[in-house]
């Protein structure tokens, strides 16, 4: 069972930046970030796996996903944040071999970290 622990959430003004981190208890081929606000469906934000990265249109050019395989840690650099980016952000992981990209078919989910943009 893979455990995921997110950190780095918080409150920031519009136009600012935050960096989320996710420490995994072991290596996983597929990882990503989802977000959810009250009353809305979960949204895939960014993913990494199968030698490619994928971004939602709403964050393309502003967010960057990266992974340190040596440390089993996933990152999400979020720049030029907007109020509509406010959500709980979840780290996700899957064992592959085919990665789900932005589909919510990941086996493991973190507890989530709140990001608030005002």
Image (cartoon, helix red, strand yellow):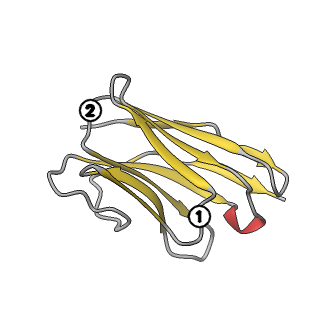
Residue that extends furthest to the top in the rendered view of this protein: 70
Q: Position of residue 107 (x, y in %)?
A: 27, 53
Residue at the disc numbered 2: 27
Helix, strand or loop under label 1: loop
Q: Position of residue 103 (x, y in %)?
A: 34, 68
* Image position of 34 (left or right of 79): left
The answer to whether 83 is drawn above or below residue 72 in the figure is: below
Residue at the image point whose x is 71% and y is 69% from the top: 84
* Image position of 60 (left or right of 32): right
How dense is the environment of label 2, judged by Cα within 10 Å: few (below 14), some, or many (20 and up)?
some
Count of marks placed on residues = 2
Residue at the image point whose x is 45% and y is 41% from the top: 66
How dense is the environment of label 1, judged by Cα within 10 Å: few (below 14), some, or many (20 and up)?
some
Q: Position of residue 14 (x, y in %)?
A: 83, 58
Residue at the disc numbered 1: 59
Of discs 1 and 2, which sits in the foreground?
Answer: 1
Q: In this orientation, which residue lies closer to the viewer: 96 or 115?
A: 96
Q: Earlier in the sequence, mark 1 or mark 2?
A: 2
Q: Position of residue 83 (x, y in %)?
A: 77, 65
In the picture, the quarter occupied by the C terminus is bottom right
The answer to whether 6 is drawn above or below residue 33 in the figure is: above
Asked if labels 2 and 1 touch by Cβ distance under 8 angstroms, the answer is: no
* Image position of 75 (left or right of 104): right
In the picture, the quarter occupied by the N terminus is top left
* Image position of 107 (left or right of 44): left
Find the distance from the CA under tag 1 to the CA under tag 2.
26 Å
Residue at the image point whose x is 49% and y is 52% from the top: 90
Residue at the image point whose x is 59% and y is 64% from the top: 59
Helix, strand or loop under label 2: loop
Q: In this orientation, which residue lies closer to the viewer: 101 or 93?
A: 101
Disc ID at residue 26:
none
């Amino acid at each position: 069972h893979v455990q995921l622990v997110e950190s780095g959430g918080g409150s920031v003004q519009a136009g600012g930046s935050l960096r989320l981190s996710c420490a995994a208890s072991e290596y996983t081929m597929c990882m990503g970030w989802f977000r959810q606000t009250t009353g809305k469906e979960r949204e895939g934000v960014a993913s990494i796996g199968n030698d490619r990265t994928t971004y939602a249109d709403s964050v393309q050019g502003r967010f960057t996903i990266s992974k340190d395989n040596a440390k089993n840690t996933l990152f999400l650099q979020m720049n030029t944040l907007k109020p509509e980016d406010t959500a709980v952000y979840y780290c996700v992981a899957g064992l592959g071999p085919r990665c789900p990209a932005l589909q919510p078919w990941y086996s493991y989910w973190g507890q989530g970290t709140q990001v608030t943009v005002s």
